[in-house]
Image: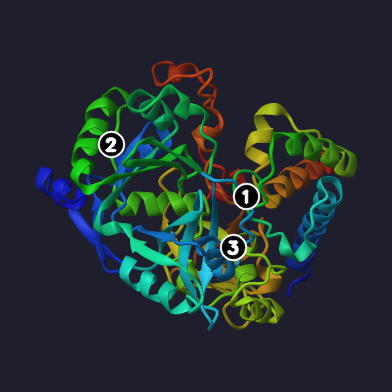
Amino acid sequence: MKEEIRKAIERREAVVNRLKSTFIDNLHLTLEPNEIDPDAALFGTGLELDSIDAVDIAIAIQTAFGVKLRSIASKASLRTLNTIADLILEAQRHHGSA
Amino acid sequence: MALLDHVLKRQHIDTICIDGIRTPAAFGSIEQEVAAIRGSVALSAMTHVCMTAVEGRDALTFVDRICPRFLHMNPNRMKQTVFIDEEGRYVADAYVCRSGDSYLLLCRGVSGDAFVQWLSALIAESEDVSLRSLNETYSLIALNGPFSWELMADIYDPEIIGLPYLSFYRPSEEVLVFRAGETGEYGYLVAAPHSEAAARWEQMLAEGERYDLVCAGHRAVEYCMLENNFFNIHKEGAFEATPAELQIQWRVSYRKSFLFADRLKAMRAKPPKARITAVHSAQPLYESQHLFCDGEEGPIGTVVNAHRFLSGPGHIGLAMIDPPYAVSGCDFYHTNDGSCEGAVSTVSPPFVNNRSLYVDPQVHSFCDRDGIVFPPLCTVPMEARKEA
């Protein structure tokens, strides 16, 4: 695997894995990290989280990654672990280039 | 008259055979049908969904014994799961609906007769369980769309707006309304006796006019499932893949003791060969197409479900990609079909910002829809979109 690809994949995997730990710890999920699929829905189906969990997640993401969710962005971003990871990586890119 | 007969008598349409049962494929253009699902209300005949009642003194324990998912739920609630057989194959993509001391199973991927036959073989001699295929007496109608709740409230009861997702109720003795759908928008399934189904269909068409209702066939609904990354047992589910590889682990529980728990544990123990990943390309994507990565000799994945993107530019799909590469947000892959090579990006599904996320039944109405603030419909990142 090319170095550029390996680095990009590792960067993303690190965020997704940290998100899994954040979810398990903050929402007290009785799941192992590899049981949480990165594209599974967080609300309704999938992890079946509710609106109270959403508040906890927003706070936990801000604490763990320093990323604040804006209201309009939060509905679009809080759909799966991967959509949250997109938001975090985007924020980190902006922060890095600032 | 069964629903399909009525629909065919009313309008000449293409039908498609799903699991041995005919269902409307399309009523008009797929663009128009998908636009209705995404923007207003779409009406569909779900003749291919098999409905099975499991009754008897041991109905609850029997379904619990064969279901891979914990079924702790109150009456009138429902859960999604996949039934697997002794070989670890997916038998059906199912909603398990608890109705008092019995269950109603709404399944895709299997015909009613084949499913009843499969279930019958699993009933122990000591169990008091009876099975009844409801497709012989009931038709299933679907309403999907960000304003489907408003039409349902007009037809049935304003209280329907408060019906929680994955629950159901009986507005009358013979009719069942389920709050469920696979399009990512507000969705309802209405089960009515064949004798009433045609009248219900006509009522929805007539009252749906003020919501710009459009009839949508199987192709449009299946396309919306792809846009929203809902598991499709006829596409990605047809592959020999574990729940982890298909990213449907939430539909099963490795901790539950059920009839084929050992098979499920064996599937889990196998190192994943691939993982389903959403992909986007400016170039056409099609099923069985290989994906490549520079620096690798052979393909790194295969497209298993694909379509031209109707809510944005380019083409979208799902691919089974080798584990090290099955990561969202990668712009390094490509197709290679002889003379044509197209860049492929892995992306985070769903591919759309569903309007239903932003439509609040307590505040909004279809007639005021122009005042609702929506984000762009397409979620594919700008970097991936710019080539399309």
Residue B277 image label:
3
Above or below for B222 versus B368: below
Which residue is the site of mark 2? B214
Which residue is the site of mark 1? A41
Residue B301: % across, % down: 56, 73
The residue under the point 72% across, 68% down is: B255
Q: Secondary structure at mark 2?
A: strand
Q: Secondary structure at mark 1?
A: loop
Do the residues bearing badges 3 and 2 touch, measured as CB atoms within 8 Å? Answer: no
Residue B284: % across, % down: 42, 60
**Distance between the Cα atoms at labels 3 and 2?**
31 Å
Residue A25: % across, % down: 87, 50
Q: How many marks?
A: 3
Do the residues bearing badges 2 and 1 touch, measured as CB atoms within 8 Å? Answer: no
- What's the amino acid at mark 1? Ala
Above or below for B146 versus B284: above
Mark 3 and mark 2 on one chain: yes
- What's the amino acid at mark 2? Val
The extreme left residue here reads B9
The numbered mark 2 sits on a residue in which chain? B
B45 and B57: which one is in front? B57
Nearest to N terminus: mark 3 or mark 2:
2
The residue under the point 58% across, 69% down is: B65
Above or below for A87 versus B20: above
